[in-house]
Image (cartoon, rainbow, N blue to C red):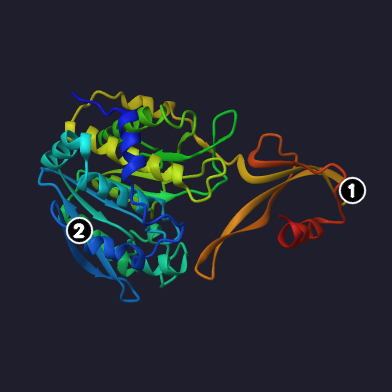
Amino acid sequence: MKKIDLKELDTWYGHNFEKTIDSRWVTLDHIQPLLLNLSAPFDISKIGESFQKRPIFKFQLGTGPIQILMWTQMHGNESTGTKAVLDMMRFFEKPGPFNWLTHLIMKSCTIHCIPILNPDGAQVYTRINAQKIDLNRDVIEKKGIETVLLQRVLKKVDPAFCFNLHDQRTLFSVGAEHHPATISFLAPSVDEARTVTSGRKETMEVIVAMNKLLQKLITNRVGRYTDEFYPTATGDNFQKMGHNTILIESGHAFGDYQRKESRKSTFLAIVEGLRYIAQQERDCDYQRYFDIPNNEKNYTDIIVRNVSVGGKKMDLSILFVEKLIDRKVVFVPTLDKKGPLLECNADKIIDGTGMTFVNENDAKKWIENDFN
């Protein structure tokens, strides 16, 4: 079976990704003109409205028997997956040398995609929706209007596979050298025992294929998200219902605060996942999923080493908190951890020898007001 030439796809991406959307802040206002301008082979429809009456759209692509459902920005401030989906739209519009692949996918699969499930949260750059509900923990109670919409589509489509696209914070690391986790995958558990069901095996196979491709580009920067069972989580419950759910967490790359590298990695993962599903290969050993290293929390934005706080030598971990200020995402430095942090890595490491702070509040004040 034909495989993707990564170098060729990387070249295609550099010339053809959706260049009009590149901010961390992505709202319905940003993407709606692109959605409404879609033509064949896309079918665009409005599936409902958010709590604040913003339209929620779904586009459909392909005519094949394998039903696939994907959605982005369930958390409004997690926009990398949305941009990767826009890039995927471009891929199907202008596949160039990958016409063979788009034809294969559309013949084998029908893709249903909801870009920005939580447009109210996206508008104000928050994780929750306008009802102050975390939609990713609302699958049982279904208090959120957007949750009801998603499950209505799920019931109608009855997908064999779901792609649940999220962002993860800078603090996640991979491996003994604590590289930033540029992308992480999860085949959600269906019970507290983390039973490896036949459905999880199929999900793991797709992830193994995606990881194999990405290791050629972002070597040692792919992580495996914790598979602890969350009884109210969307992915865990969809997997439990029999819909193989692939969780993708787009993360950080060194110095890449606009997440351009994780955006491309997410796009590549989606395309490879679709190829593997469409070809129905079953040639990836699901057990290789467990070879992907676990996410650890050993990365941060800045580490200041060897400072004195209250007469004690220690290291300070500074983590940026993202805030929407004047329609721009601003990265605000905050004290995250203190103590011996030799196991941690960061984008920037500063020798703080000679720096003295009376107490922790004094250090926080320096970080929040004077640090640059």
Q: Amino acid at mark 1?
A: Gly
Above-or-below relation of 291 to 277? above
Question: Residue 226: x and y, percent?
Answer: 46, 40
Name the residue beneath numbered marker 2.
Answer: 38
Residue 20 visible (yes or no):
yes
Q: Amino acid at mark 2?
A: Leu
Task: Rate crowding at label 1 as few (under 14), some (14 to 19) or many (20 or more) other CA atoms within 10 Å.
Answer: few
* Point 18% across, 39% down: residue: 102
Residue 98, picture quadrant: top left
Q: Secondary structure at mark 1?
A: loop
The residue at the far right in this view is 311
- Tell me whether the residue at label 2 lies in contact with that at label 1, contact meaning CB atoms closer than 8 angstroms: no
* Point 22% across, 60% down: residue: 58
Residue 40, picture quadrant: bottom left
- Give the camera-side residue of 269 and 37: 37
Name the residue beneath numbered marker 1.
Answer: 311
Question: Residue 195: x and y, percent?
Answer: 35, 35
The span from disc 2 to disc 1 (Cα, nearest Å) is: 63 Å
- Give the camera-side residue of 345 and 29: 29
